[in-house]
Amino acid sequence: MRRVSKSTRRDVQISEFDKRDLGHDIARSRSAVVVRPRTRQLPTSILLDAGIVDKLKQKGGKRGIGYQTMLKIIVHEHVDEY
């Protein structure tokens, strides 16, 4: 009986894994979920007072996000109020 070392077995497993395309298996299982659908975003530019930018940086810093992301959240949450 021939013995196969662990490293040889591992190499065989890795090479077999590398050969296999899992794309069809994932699609068939329907286990892949889109977390954030792609939406069309338009670039815009606005002039903000330095004080507002500082406040956005402070509030965004508390959440661990940047000031521009903080501004997008605020606009998204309050756009329907106007």
Image (cartoon, grey):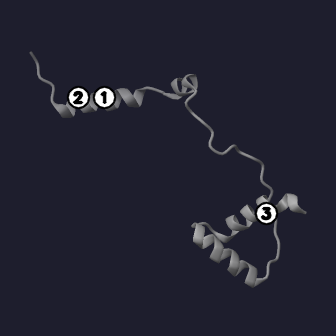
Q: CA distance from mark 3 to mark 2?
A: 56 Å
Which of discs 3 and 1 lies nearer the camera? The answer is 3
Locate residue 31, reporting x and y percent: 55, 30
Q: Amino acid at mark 3?
A: Val
Q: Which mark is residue 9?
A: 2
Q: Are marks 3 and 1 in contact (CB under 8 Å)?
A: no
Instruction: Kindly identify the residue that appears in the image at 63 percent across and 39 percent down.
Output: 34
Q: Residue furthest right?
A: 82
Q: Which residue is mark 1?
A: 13
Q: Which residue is mark 3?
A: 75
Instruction: Kindly identify the residue that appears in the image at 63 percent across and 70 percent down.
Output: 60
Could you classify mark 1 by the number of other residues whose Cα lies within 10 Å: few (under 14), some (14-19), or many (20 or more)? few
Locate residue 29, reporting x and y percent: 54, 24
Instruction: Kindly identify the residue that appears in the image at 38 percent across and 29 percent down.
Output: 17
State how many labels appear.
3
Locate residue 65, reporting x and y percent: 61, 66
Tell me if residue 33 comes above or below residue 53 in the rendering. Answer: above
Q: CA distance from mark 3 to mark 1?
A: 51 Å
Q: Are marks 2 and 1 in contact (CB under 8 Å)?
A: yes
- SS state under label 3: helix
Tell me if residue 8 comes above or below residue 37 in the rendering. Answer: above
- Judging depth in this view, the residue of 71 and 43 nearest the camera is 71
